Amino acid sequence: MADKTDLEFLEQLIAAPSPSGYEAPVRALLKQVLAPLADSCETDMMGNLILRLAGSGNGKPRVMLTAHCDEIGFLIKHIDDNGFVRFSAIGGVDPHIVPGHRVHVVTGNGLVPGVVGRKPIHLLDAKDKERISPITEQFIDIGCSSKEEAEAVAAVGDPVVFVDGLQRLQGKRLAARAFDDKVGVFAVAQAFRQLATGPRPDAEVVALFSVQEELGLRGAVTGTYGVRPDIALAIEIGHASDTPGSEPHLVGEVKLGNGPAISRGPNINHQLFALLQEVARRNGIPLQIVGEQRATSTDANVVQLSRRGVATSLLRVPTRYVHTPSEVVDFSDVQQVVDLLVATVAEIRQRDDFLPE
């Protein structure tokens, strides 16, 4: 399947709840694992985690590897007199898939289990059976019978996440919540570990684990401004188009197990794209090219625009069922992203190599 230690680390990342604005658990895990290897480690005022490795070359460019460590989730808005919890979505949650799921309320005293309630199908009239219940009509049952009882264990403003952890499917396929973007976080962390423990590249390397991407790329804006990279490689999930009803002519032909997807378009530096292609070819790493005709809805968007501009590229891990509690990836694609990051960083020596022609 894969190295057991690697899968255990990915499982730990998934298990660390990190809805946007509440990323402390995953940040603590990353600091524990990576800080001993870094030349410096800091958390900025926004909550981004930034780790640095000094380069070995003269006039070294600064290369940033980045992935967002937040996930979609919910936030408690109100607790009623009977102890039921009303909530709003953090990020792009599909209200179709929420009812009936088990959740955890993330509190200062630990995780409080609950379930998202819904009127049984037996009691719904015909029109309600076809209707999507908006988030504002849904509620969480944490097993309490009164407002006072519920407020003793949960509070307005507490975040909530789906319970769903890592599940191994057939072959190298994995299912879990929050692969968006914990697989990106995993890839950046693994690449950083390899670069820290192997021969140092010419370039200075900075890992930026950004926050609040799901609320509008917020952490990447401040984080990139502070890092001041010359070159950046952003790692995200990408929509797979190999399931029933998919539309490859709209989202690109992307299949699980066929290697990383690499974006091409105005948001991408052409020289960096060409380097990634060449490094992938030499290392036997298959790539799936996705055309992106405008600024992407990823951190790569704001990274490219920071200060006077950053040579930016975007690698995507093909993912099915994005923003559901059961996103599916092929672990071989994730591993190949790590390999491509390490091999590409080793090739970067001069900032000016990436100036547009």
Image: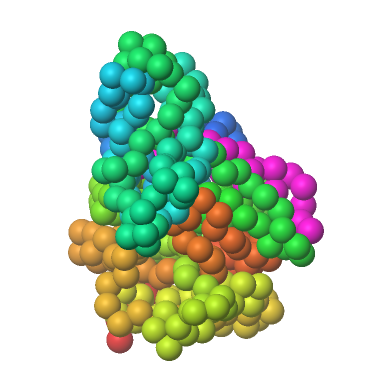
Q: Nearer the viewer, residue 242 or 179?
A: 242
Which image quadrant is residue 22 in? top left
Q: Residue furthest left?
A: 308
In this rendering, the answer to whether 292 lies above or below 23 is below
Residue 34 vs 223, above or below: the answer is above
The residue nearer to you, when weighing 245 against 280, is: 245
Q: Nearer the viewer, residue 275 or 121?
A: 121
Task: Give coordinates of residue 26: x percent, y percent.
Answer: 49, 37
Q: Percent from the top left, x then y, of residue 318? A: 54, 69
Residue 154, position as x, y percentages in the image? 38, 20
Where is residue 37, by image quadrant?
A: top right
Asked if the magenta segment contains residue 23, the reply would be: yes
Q: Quadrant of residue 90?
A: top left
What percent of the width, then of the height, locates residue 63? 43, 59
Name the residue: 69% across, 79% down.
Answer: 284
- Residue 59 visible within the image: no
Residue drawn at (50%, 63%) of the image = 321
Is 30 covered by the magenta stretch? no
Residue at the image point whose x is 42% and y is 80% from the top: 251
**96 up-or-down from 140: above or below:** below
Pick the quarter of the image with the N terminus: bottom right
Quadrant in which the C terminus is drawn: bottom left
Coloring applied to the structure = rainbow
Which contiguous range is marked in magenta? 1-24
User: Horizontal placement of 197 versus 110: left or right?
Assistant: right
Name the residue located 75 percent from the left edge and 62 percent from the top edge: 170
In the rendered image, the vertical position of residue 307 relative to residue 192, given as above or below: below
